[in-house]
Image (cartoon, rainbow, N blue to C red):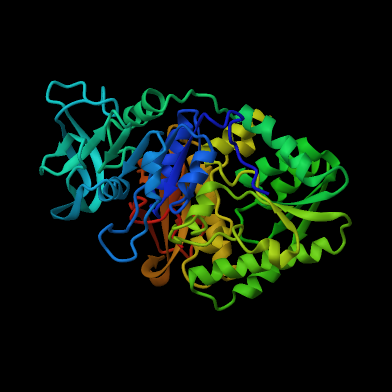
């Protein structure tokens, strides 16, 4: 099932052609923030298919390709003759120049990171981006190639301090190009530029809301499932699967069977809390499966992070197979897959795999179930909005994101019962101490402990010890696609380390992770 949040007015949407950039998802998120629906389609989608969708505009994303190289990914050039506005970003701008007979090549200087952009002349796309008299703003660059000269009829509207073309456009044709990324927060005028394209150039109206999503998705679920069949919901207790469970509960009531598998890789006391909460709040059946020993046995001796993820995914499949044998009339499996899961698993066309997610891909064939993923085109913040609209308690909706493979990807190296015990204790202490700092928890997207796999010399009671080093990771983010590390309050760090050394004598050292995403990922593995 491809349930999505498309606005019922299909002519009030934007199409994004994906060329493999990790920023494609961020472009979509910025558009959704403006309450305009958008879809990401593969770069080779035909102009005829795009025209049939009656969208208000097309955005050609960035990507790692070079337009002058053999085998470079190319879009249908007829897109530029459809009569709808087109915006090319980074590789998209280079592709635009290539097709429309501008000149693209390797520049003398690559620009990676924040750059100073000077406005030469305003056009509808960059109107109002720089209130200063200097007509300067800062933008995020990520390119090695550049447009050396624009196509005939295009105006160069901005250049970087190095003289590289940063923006160009043909207002009469409503075709524009940007060498920088307006979707990234480091571009100071990014929101203004995106809104200019959506509302002033494409004529969109802000009509998408979580309420619209619920109203449209519930009847879609009911139509897909029918009046008799039941749905098996894979419930992890996290935000995403919880919203799916409540959405199905609203649509199908007693015909939903929620299964929670305790694989032993979740946080301290969480299994008990999940059992108590969902067994009381959902109308359908709630099945609790204790599979801790099963998962731990399968992970014995495994150190490769991707192999750990694959094993956990496979075991989930087997557990659900076993559970499904005792159920009648169940032909559907519902999962809490969201957009960031899809893109990081490389499931979108042209996307590079960053890390696999156990709830993405392969399950329908192996389980014999038809797959339902109602949230797979929503971002995390949108999922939370939908959850609040459904009336889900804040204690569930405001939970930190938690990886599907759980603490297995916060233990570097082999996962053992002893390591799990250490990490659960440390993470529980961190959660307790963080709860005393509301200003920190309000700022943080995630904060957690990691067993680093590093052994370090320590001293206890005057004797030499040699034990594991623990790291604290705290990041701020809007959607998990990018993240900035943040510094927990010093008093929190002091209380945490003091308690760790007192309550977990095996730990010899506590470290602080100061890595943003990119270049790192939020999780260690």
Front position in the image: 380 or 414: 380
Where is residue 336? Give x, y as percent.
63, 48
Instruction: Describe residue 31's horizontal placement relative to residue 135 as left or right.
Output: right
Where is residue 45? Give x, y as percent.
48, 50
Front position in the image: 312 or 265: 312
In this view, the residue farthest toward the bottom is 301
Instruction: Describe residue 136's horizontal placement relative to residue 285 as left or right.
Output: left
Choose top left, top right, bottom left or bottom right for residue 322: bottom right
Residue located 70% across and 67% down the image = 366
Where is residue 481? Give x, y as percent.
43, 47
Q: Is residue 222 above or below residue 321?
A: above
* Total number of numbered discs in the rendering: 0
Would residue 336 be seen by someone viewing this image from the given angle? yes
Residue located 49% across and 42% down the image = 50
Choose top left, top right, bottom left or bottom right for residue 167: top left
Q: Is residue 353 above or below residue 111?
A: below
Instruction: Describe residue 9's horizontal placement relative to residue 34 as left or right.
Output: right
Where is residue 503? Give x, y as percent.
52, 56
Front position in the image: 345 or 482: 345
Q: Is residue 175 above or below residue 228?
A: above
Front position in the image: 123 or 483: 123
């Amino acid at each position: 099932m491809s349930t999505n949040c498309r606005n019922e007015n299909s002519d009030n949407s934007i199409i994004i052609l994906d060329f493999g950039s990790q920023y494609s998802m961020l472009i979509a998120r910025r558009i959704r923030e403006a309450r305009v629906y958008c879809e990401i389609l593969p770069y080779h989608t035909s102009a005829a298919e795009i025209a049939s969708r009656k969208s208000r505009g097309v955005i050609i994303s960035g990507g790692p390709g070079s337009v002058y190289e053999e085998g470079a990914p190319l879009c249908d050039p007829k897109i530029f003759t459809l009569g709808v506005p087109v915006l090319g970003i980074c590789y998209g701008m280079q592709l635009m120049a290539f097709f429309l007979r501008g000149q693209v090549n390797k520049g003398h200087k690559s620009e990676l990171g924040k750059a100073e952009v000077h406005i030469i002349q305003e056009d509808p796309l960059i109107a109002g981006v720089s209130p200063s008299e200097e007509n300067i703003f800062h933008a995020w660059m990520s390119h090695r190639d550049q447009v050396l000269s624009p196509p005939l009829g295009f105006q160069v509207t901005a250049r970087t301090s190095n003289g590289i073309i940063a923006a160009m456009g043909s207002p009469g044709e409503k075709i524009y190009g940007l060498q920088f990324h307006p979707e990234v927060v480091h571009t100071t005028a990014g929101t203004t530029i995106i809104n200019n394209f959506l509302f002033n150039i494409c004529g969109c109206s802000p009509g998408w809301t979580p309420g619209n999503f619920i109203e449209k998705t519930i009847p879609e679920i009911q139509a897909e499932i029918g009046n008799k069949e039941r749905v098996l919901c894979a419930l992890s207790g996290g935000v995403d699967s919880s919203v799916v469970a409540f959405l199905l509960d609203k649509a199908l009531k007693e015909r939903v069977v929620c299964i929670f598998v305790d694989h032993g890789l979740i946080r301290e006391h969480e299994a008990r809390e999940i059992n108590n909460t969902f067994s009381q709040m959902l109308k359908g059946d709630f099945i609790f499966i204790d599979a801790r020993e099963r998962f731990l046995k399968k992970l014995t001796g495994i150190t490769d992070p991707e192999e750990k993820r694959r094993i956990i995914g496979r075991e989930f499949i087997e557990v659900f197979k076993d559970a499904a044998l005792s159920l009648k009339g169940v032909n559907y499996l519902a999962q809490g897959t969201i957009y960031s899961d899809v893109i990081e698993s490389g499931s979108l066309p042209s996307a590079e795999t960053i890390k696999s997610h156990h709830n993405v891909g392969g399950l329908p064939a192996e389980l014999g179930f038809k797959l339902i993923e109602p949230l797979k085109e929503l971002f995390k913040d949108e999922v939370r909005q939908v959850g609040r609209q459904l009336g889900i308690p804040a204690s569930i909706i405001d939970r930190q994101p938690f990886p599907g493979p759980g603490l297995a990807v916060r233990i570097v190296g082999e996962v053992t019962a002893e390591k799990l015990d250490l990490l659960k204790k440390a993470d529980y202490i961190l959660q307790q101490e963080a709860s005393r700092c509301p200003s920190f928890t309000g700022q943080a997207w995630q904060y957690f402990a990691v067993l680093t796999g590093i052994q370090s010399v320590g001293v206890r009671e005057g004797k030499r010890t040699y034990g594991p080093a623990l790291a604290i990771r705290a990041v701020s983010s809007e959607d998990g696609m990018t993240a900035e590390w943040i510094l927990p309050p010093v008093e929190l760090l002091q209380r945490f380390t003091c308690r760790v050394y007192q309550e977990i004598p095996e730990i010899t050292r506590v470290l602080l992770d100061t890595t943003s995403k990119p270049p790192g990922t939020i999780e260690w593995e």
